[in-house]
Amino acid sequence: MANCPVCDAEVEIAPDTVVGELMTCEDCGCELEVLTLEPVKLGEAPEAEEDWGE
Ligand SMILES: [Zn+2]
């Protein structure tokens, strides 16, 4: 499990998830990208034109 950086909902992480994988938060519908594993850290997918920073 990880938390959505947008709405803080719990997002289920599959065991075979890899860094850079994209998933959608079922709660807010945002596209999320896996930034790191162990611990899993999610960021907003760089799809939008906004600066998603650090
Ligand atoms: Zn969310």
Image (cartoon, grey):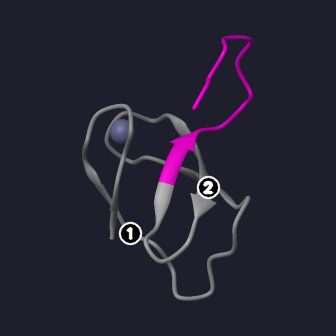
Q: Under tag 2, what secondary structure?
A: strand
Q: Quadrant of residue 36?
A: bottom right
Q: Quadrant of the N terminus?
A: bottom left
> On the image, numbered disc 1 is attached to which residue?
12
Of 18 and 39, which appears nearest the observer? 39
Q: Under tag 1, what secondary structure?
A: loop
Q: Quadrant of the C terminus?
A: top right
Residue 43 among those drawn in magenta: yes
Taking 21 as reference, is 2 left or right? left
**Quarter, ligand 1:** top left
Q: Which stretch appears magenta?
A: 42-54
Marks 2 and 1, how far apart at CA: 15 Å
Of 48 and 35, which appears nearest the observer? 35
> On the image, numbered disc 2 is attached to which residue?
35
Measured from the top left, where is residue 6 in percent x and y? Answer: 37, 31
Of 54 and 29, which appears nearest the observer? 54
Q: Earlier in the sequence, mark 2 or mark 1?
A: 1
